Image (cartoon, grey):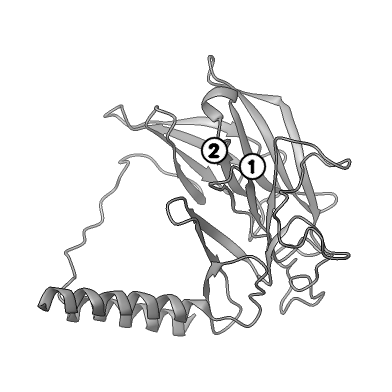
Amino acid sequence: MYKLILNLLLLNVTFINYSFSQNVKLINAFPGITFNKPIEFITTNDGTNRIFIVEQGGVIYTIDRNNSKYNKIKFLDVSTKVISGGELGLLGFALDPKFNNNGYFYINYTARNPLRTIVSRFNLDLKKEKVDYKSEFKIIEISQPFKNHNGGCIRFGFDNYLYIATGDGGSGGDPNNNAQNFTSLLGKLLRIVVHNKSEGKNYSIPNDNPYINKLKARPEIYALGFRNPWKFYIDFKTKKIWLGDVGQEKYEEIDLVEKTVSYKHLRAHETVLDIVCRLLLEKKKNNHD
């Protein structure tokens, strides 16, 4: 952690030295509105200009940015289904690519008895703007051996497949070696098709998933070797996936995710900083040319 902070400080100094810095001022975007452990801030392109705020305890709120007097409106409350606290809770939220037409959205949460991760789909009545709680359709369930390292981020990609980040199962040092185990869904970035069922599952597998033909490997796996991939971002323009993996002692990690790569020994945040510094140097050179 300290090394990352130092690197970020050095990066900030680099910006200043190259005269690229700007005055930054923090303002309260939504005065008078507070949230309890918000873990996701999701914007939409559904024409409503609203945003979704996801709380770890199991509640999702919306804020209408068309209204000058901001109010938070409860969109979903699954707090009775969720076990929350520490690294447990409602950890992921994603709108279906065809949300405007079908009202589908997906959540990732941890449940008790037994402890497990659940990725579910719900239906929103687009006319009444109300969630049908009875519509919950469990896409996938993953057993959790410990209460930490749950990952939880879910995103739809440019290919309309659902990507799911899973932690290595917890404790410390991955005692069960889940992240490197091809038969486990833990410590992975998964990619599945949520609009079709296949082979007794409530989802199917993309034909180009990298391990679909590997003996004994789980075909859902897109990339492996992660500890606790807390957030990731899919750039639709470049089709690249950037993933933040929580470190244990010395390092935090940002990975540029590629198929078939194991991220066990990579320290990709250094590579990312190298890229940023190189771009800054190129910008400075161009400014002087």
Separation of marks 2 and 1 at Cα, in angstroms: 10 Å
Q: Mark 2 points at which residue?
A: 60
Q: What element carries label 2?
A: strand
Give coordinates of residue 144: x percent, y percent: 79, 59
Q: Name the residue under label 1.
A: 107
User: Height in image: 141 above or below 246?
Assistant: above
- Residue at position x 58%, y 76% from top? 247
Label 2 Cα neighbours within 10 Å, binned few <14 / some 14-19 / many ≥20: many
Circle 2/circle 1 CB separation < 8 Å: yes
Q: Nearer the viewer, residue 168 or 265?
A: 265
Mark 1: which secondary structure?
Answer: strand
- Which of these two is toward me, 242 or 159? 159
Q: Tell me the kind of residue under disc 2.
A: Ile
Type of amino acid under label 1:
Ile
Residue 89 % position (x, y): 65, 51
Tell me if 160 is positioned left or right of 49 in this view. Answer: right
Identify the residue shown where x is 74% and y is 71%: 179
* Looking at the image, residue 144 lies above or below residue 32: below
Within-10-Å neighbours for mark 1: few <14, some 14–19, many 20+? many
